Image (spheres, rainbow, N blue to C red):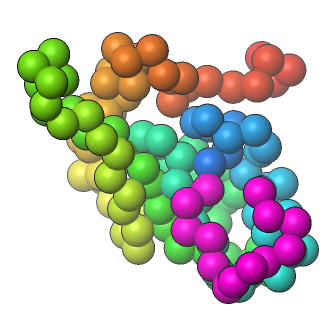
Amino acid sequence: MAEVSNGRANLHLHTIFSDGELPPAEVVAAHAAAGFVVIALTDHDTLAGIDALGSLEGHGLRMISGVELSIEDEPGRGLVDAHLLGYGFALNNRRLRNRRIKRARPVRRRNGKRSTDWRRPDTG
């Protein structure tokens, strides 16, 4: 994570809810302190980082909704296994929350990547 903004935006950030090292509030605070104007939390296959903040508003910078979805198309045959970044969606989008993200979770588990249910050891 940059200590000083080398631009105005960072639109690909992870928290402890995927493969990041900091809780969402600390990621946001560090970027606000470093002078970023716009950020997006894009945890893998979950909106838990954004949900933990309670809102995209009132954090000292502009936040855009974001997520990094795992996309799999027959990887056993050597086909696509990629990540797709999505931005600017409504946080109450039930189709995204209930269908897309839930479908992506087993992909991460099968591939040996951290589960979207992962938490820091000290949080239980």
In the rendering, at what x and y percent does residue 70 appear? 33, 39
Identified at 39% across, 25% down, the residue is 108
Looking at the rendered image, the quarter that the N terminus falls into is bottom right
Q: Which residue in the rendered view is the most extreme toward the front? A: 78
- Answer above or below: position of 71 versus 54: above
Q: Which residue is drawn at 30% across and 41% down?
A: 82
The number of callouts visible is 0
Q: In which quarter of the image is the C terminus?
A: top right
Q: Is 65 drawn above or below residue 120 in the view shown?
A: below
83 shown above or below 26? above
* Whether residue 103 can be seen here: yes
Magenta includes 6?
A: yes
Q: In which quarter of the image is residue 103?
A: top left
Q: What stretch is highlighted in magenta?
A: 1-13
Q: Residue at x 68, y 40 (%)?
A: 20
Q: Is 45 within the magenta?
A: no
Q: Is residue 33 left or right of residue 47?
A: right
- Depth order, front residue of 32/111: 111
Counting from the top left corner in percent of width and height, residue 38 is at 64, 80
In the image, 70: left or right of 117? left
Comparing 82 with 104, the one in front is 82
**Whether residue 90 can be seen here:** no
Q: Is residue 9 above or below residue 71?
A: below
How would you classify the magenta stretch by its main secondary structure?
loop
Q: Percent x, y for residue 37?
A: 71, 85
Point 45% across, 54% down: residue: 67
Percent from the top left, x then y, of residue 90? 39, 69
